[in-house]
Image: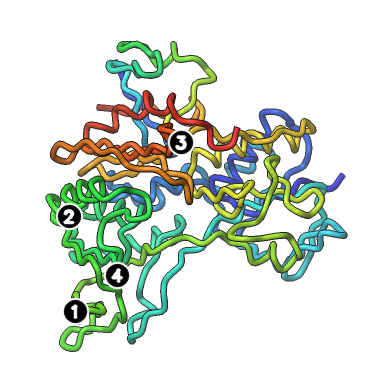
């Protein structure tokens, strides 16, 4: 029998392996990864400086250890060339691999807007453990970091790098922290918390270019659309994530923002499934661990012969900014309603109610994060 | 009393504090938490927690 083939060794790929092996110890499984195949947790990449952890210390297991522990084959450094869904075959550069079922756990790419300048090639993004290792190395002996983007990753890194002793400047064109996730008073609280740590914000302008310093070529100068020049040792882009859909699209699978799946994580091709950051499950693109874990458990059952739809309950997102803790349960897109906000210092409790007065989302900062569980009980499940 | 950290997201379970909102009383030992309990922040199971030294 052909193996189950999983493409991707991030949390989605390896947790599918782990959950599947709880149910089926025998069926051959092959994991293909373009990375080095070490098992790590991506959320931990944004607290590494606070915890003083190198990339090696964040790696929980080598690919050999994963292979042994779960009785699977892990092939590292493999770039998949294509998928032939009719023949149920993954095309590799010099080879191919036939599958009984295929799991796409491809993750997401960081997205950086077009920048000019002679130092664009030195702008970092941290999207996996290998990136993190290179980023840490580049920061050795350095002091100043410019972060482009004040969303979840940008704010987490601003907090973490400040804790690690770096001077952080953060550029966010939308004018406040976490603009896509939080209502204004909550954004302001996070901004104050990070400012107290020493983060310098540049709200409003866009980054236009990154050059080498004129006097000191070791320095980088980030040029903003308002004419400001920010000098730093390292520039980190944390603008956004885009689901990786390329190989799925090329193989003729239906895609939109992500790879389209039904509630059982089935794509438009027979015996091909998708989960995690690359998937769009019944319209939901949720690049967070909570939905990913629910998906891995359901998919493991399906692969083990018991077709199982995934349920998404309430899906709160915890943002690791200890300078001002944040928990947010995002409001469904295009839902009409109003925020009710209570505020005291950096403690903000913002509740979003729809036109019928039902709670549909919240944003909590500071001490208000303690109310998360109570509020979760009032919220409807995202995808029952 | 010990603390346990989720290796996936960093959530800390503190035995001293428990998780009263989830019905886990303060002082509840890690071993006494049900095996099907999952991390409130990221949804991984008990096996993905490690004891942390304080």
- The image quadrant of residue A167 is bottom left
Q: Position of residue A163 (x, y in %)?
A: 20, 49
Secondary structure found at label 1: strand
Residue position for label 1: A229
Q: Considering only order in the chain, which callout, 4 or 1, is on the residue closer to the N terminus?
A: 1
User: Which circle, 3 or 2, is nearer the viewer?
Assistant: 3
Q: Output the chain of dot 1.
A: A
User: Which circle, 4 or 3, is nearer the viewer?
Assistant: 3
Q: CA distance from mark 4 to mark 3?
A: 29 Å
Q: CA distance from mark 1 to mark 4?
A: 13 Å
Q: Output the chain of dot 2.
A: A
In-image side of A37 versus A304 (left or right): left
Secondary structure found at label 2: loop
| Disc on res. A168 | none
- The image quadrant of residue A78 is bottom right
Q: Considering only order in the chain, which callout, 2 or 1, is on the residue closer to the N terminus?
A: 2
Q: CA distance from mark 3 to mark 2?
A: 28 Å
In the rendered image, residues at marks 1 and 3 fall on the same chain: no
The residue lying at 32 percent from left, 60 percent from top is A136
Residue position for label 4: A235
| Disc on res. A165 | 2
Q: CA distance from mark 1 to mark 3?
A: 39 Å
Q: Determine whether B53 is above or below A45 in the image.
A: above
Residue nearest the observer in this picture, A180 or A139:
A180
Report the quarter where the N terminus of chain A lies: top right
In-image side of A273 versus B3 (left or right): right
Q: Are marks 1 and 3 in contact (CB under 8 Å)?
A: no
The residue lying at 44 percent from left, 34 percent from top is A356
In-image side of A351 versus A32 (left or right): left
Q: Is residue A138 visible?
A: no
Q: CA distance from mark 1 to mark 2?
A: 22 Å
């Amino acid at each position: 029998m052909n193996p189950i083939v999983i493409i991707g060794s991030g949390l989605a790929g390896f947790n599918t392996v782990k959950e599947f092996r709880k149910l089926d110890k025998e069926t051959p499984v092959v994991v293909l990864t373009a990375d080095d195949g070490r098992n790590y947790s991506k959320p931990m990449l944004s607290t590494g400086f606070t915890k003083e952890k190198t990339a090696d210390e964040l790696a929980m297991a080598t690919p050999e250890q994963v292979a042994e522990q779960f009785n699977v084959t892990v092939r590292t450094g493999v770039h998949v060339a294509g998928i032939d869904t009719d023949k149920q075959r993954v095309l590799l550069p010099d080879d191919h691999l036939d599958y009984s079922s295929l799991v796409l756990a491809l993750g997401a790419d960081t997205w950086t807007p077009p920048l000019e300048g002679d130092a664009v090639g030195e702008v970092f993004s941290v999207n996996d453990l290998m990136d993190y290792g290179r980023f840490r190395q580049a920061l050795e002996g350095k002091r100043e970091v410019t972060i482009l983007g004040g969303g979840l990753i940008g704010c987490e890194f601003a907090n973490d790098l400040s804790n690690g002793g770096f001077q952080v400047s953060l550029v966010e064109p939308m004018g406040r922290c976490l603009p896509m996730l939080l209502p204004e008073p909550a954004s302001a609280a996070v901004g104050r918390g990070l400012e107290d740590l020493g983060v310098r914000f540049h709200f409003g302008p866009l980054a236009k270019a990154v050059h080498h310093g004129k006097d000191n070529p070791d320095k980088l100068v980030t040029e903003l659309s308002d004419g400001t020049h920010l000098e730093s040792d390292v520039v980190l882009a944390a603008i956004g994530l885009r689901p990786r859909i390329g190989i799925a699209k090329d193989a003729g699978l239906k895609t939109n923002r992500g790879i389209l799946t039904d509630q059982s994580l089935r794509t438009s091709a027979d015996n091909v499934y998708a989960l995690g950051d690359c998937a769009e499950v019944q319209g939901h693109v949720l690049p967070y661990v909570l939905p990913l874990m629910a998906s891995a458990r359901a998919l493991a059952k399906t692969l083990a012969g018991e077709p199982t739809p995934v349920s998404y309950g309430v899906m709160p997102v915890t943002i690791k900014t200890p300078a001002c803790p944040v928990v947010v349960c995002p409001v469904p897109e295009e839902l009409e309603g109003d925020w009710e906000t209570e505020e005291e210092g950096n403690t903000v409790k913002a509740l979003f109610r729809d036109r019928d007065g039902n709670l549909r989302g919240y944003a909590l900062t500071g001490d208000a994060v303690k109310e998360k569980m109570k509020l979760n009980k009032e919220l409807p499940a995202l995808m029952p | 009393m010990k603390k346990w950290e989720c290796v996936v997201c960093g959530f800390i379970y503190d035995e001293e504090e428990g998780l009263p909102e989830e019905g886990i009383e303060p002082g509840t030992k890690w071993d006494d938490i049900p095996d099907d309990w999952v991390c409130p922040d990221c949804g991984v199971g008990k096996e993905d927690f490690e004891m942390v030294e304080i």
